[in-house]
Amino acid sequence: MLNKLLFKNQDRKQLIIAMIGAFMGITFLITSIHYLIKVNEFGEGADILGPNTIMVQKKVSNSSSLNLTRTDFSLKELEKIKSEPFILDVKPVVSNNFDVSFETADPLVPRFRSDVFIQTVDPKFLDVKNPLWKWNKNDTVVPIIMPREFLVMLNTFMSASGIPQVSDDLAMDINFKFTLSNEDNSKKEWVDARIIGFTNEVSSILVPESFMAYGNDNFSDGTEQKITQVMISGKESEFGRVEELLEARGLESKNAQMVVGRLKSMVGTLFLVVLGISVIAVFVSGLVLIQYMQLLMTRNAYEVRTLLRIGYPPKEIIQKFFIYFVKIFGIIALMGIAIFFIFKYFLDEMFASGGLYIDTGITFGSIGTLIFAYIIFTFASYQTAKKGIFREY
């Protein structure tokens, strides 16, 4: 009876328009946040480099081949690159300044030996979350990150030798060994090594910084350490400016890194635009619903005053308006989630068919945003109902 009395003077058209606006806003809000998170996560776990990070070097030209121009970086050049507003950080990639060979040292695997090129990068540029990624001179095993091309080469060797090929997990169980030596082989040292990860982004074996420093300090011939590659970390959604910087300074990176960075930047920007529009839509539709509540209480001012005069508690009337609009927003939120899952199914299929294999799990960020929006609307609804009723009290 009380509901019929309080909600009889409604303008259904305005309510429906506000509900449609809120429904569309919530649907696109959840969708945009979900895929913005997933796009930023794209590539993580499959590659060793951290997000928005690329390894670059100078392009080799004819003049470089004739030693007329330099292909290494000076500290001044690194500082100039780092000063760009869209660059987060720049660090040199340190290479070995001594001779290194790498071989299998496992009785279950045939002997395989090759001279190799090892490098190390600042740990904050790596997306490695492994506590084994450390070394000191008292350790018996050096943890290494292996380029996937090396595993392919190792499997080719094993196949030619009539031995079963190895998977990533099995390769991590194989014992390897480094041989460190100076230029004339008058000084040598053998160190055991173990693979802890693989990368598609780096063509050399990566070792901890402490191990590289130990090798350069004890086996280098004293020649100057040149910086031929650097790690660059750029801001999200500004990869286009990073690409322009590389072109202007005659730098290059692996094509796969450029494609992934360009794709993440483009798709991320698109979803940021959708996110901005969605936030505005949810905010505006929420305001319309609040204004509709105010209008409804104004139209029922006589009924509200009458109920108060005959002894109805103000809190009970406030609760009726509050619950009514919270239910409306709850229905809108549930409908938005349902349509989101439908969108998600088709968008995941579309991304997969386009070669962008995004994780299909649900993000807590998108659901958390919906809960946050619901809490804000609940609070605003209660305050509006309370203010409107006590104005007639």
Image (spheres, rainbow, N blue to C red):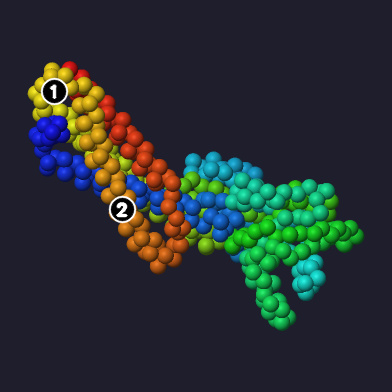
User: Which residue is painted at 36% across and 60% down in the image?
Assistant: 345
On screen, residue 189 above or below 286: below
Q: Earlier in the sequence, mark 2 or mark 1?
A: 1
Q: Is residue 305 visible?
A: no
User: Which residue is painted at 70% across and 51% down in the image?
Assistant: 132
Q: Quadrant of the N terminus?
A: top left
Examine the image and state in which quarter residue 8 appears. Answer: top left
Examine the image and state in which quarter residue 319 appears. Answer: top left
* 127 lies left or right of 294: right
- In the rendered image, residue 331, in percent from the top left (x then y), is placed at 26, 45
Crowdedness near tag 1: few (<14), some (14–19) or many (≥20) residues, C-alpha within 10 Å: some
Q: Nearer the viewer, residue 167 or 261?
A: 167
* 246 lies left or right of 207: left
- In the rendered image, residue 240, in percent from the top left (x then y), is placed at 44, 52
On screen, residue 361 above or below 307: below
Dot label at residue 338: 2
Eye-nearest disc, 2 or 1: 1
Q: How many marks?
A: 2
Which residue is disc 1 drawn over?
307
User: Which residue is painted at 77% across and 72% down in the image?
Assistant: 108
